[in-house]
Amino acid sequence: MPDGPLVVLIATVWAYWLGVGAMVVRVRRTNRKLVGLVPEQRVERYMWLVWVPLIAAWLFLPYAAATRSSGFFALPAFAQEGGAYGALRWIAAAATASLWRRLTRRVGDLSQHNACHRENCENDEGE
């Protein structure tokens, strides 16, 4: 049986980065530039030396823990046991899912506002 909190973590992290990728594609299609995809300044290029491997690890490590039963990347035995630590993992997973839901609603509202603003829509204040 899959580890519930770990599945929530994997789904959250992968959904987040898929959303980031979708926003980059949308901006790219709108602006016809590689904004947000290719670093333009030297400092940004150096930051990418850290960020790209970090994001790759962020995506890989929870998946590796879920798919391995032993070895270096496997979920430790104390994390698989129930008890207080197991309860804490479920609380963290529930909090993550709740906060993710709230964040996606706000981002959706902001995207809708920005789209309307670009089209010079009237706002609710009656301008």
Image (cartoon, grey):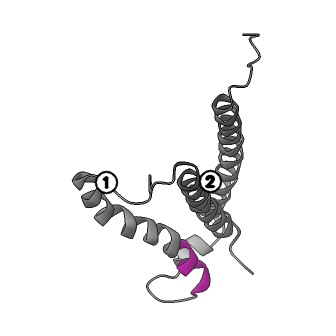
Residue at (65, 28) in percent of width and height: 117
> Is 119 in front, or is 60?
119
Residue at 62% from the left image edge and 63% from the top image edge: 9
Label drawn at residue 92:
2
Indicate the position of residue 93 as horizontal and vertical percent values.
Answer: 66, 57
Between 63 and 3, the one nearer to me in the picture: 63
The three-letter amino acid code for the residue at tag 1 is Glu
Residue 108: where, in percent of width, then height?
70, 41
Q: Is residue 87 left or right of residue 79?
A: right
Residue pointed to by mark 1: 40
Relative placement, left or right, of 85 versus 2 is left
Does the magenta portion include 63?
yes
Q: Earlier in the sequence, mark 1 or mark 2?
A: 1
Q: How many callouts does the rendering have?
A: 2
- The residue under the point 34% across, 57% down is 39
Provide the residue span drawn in magenta.
62-68
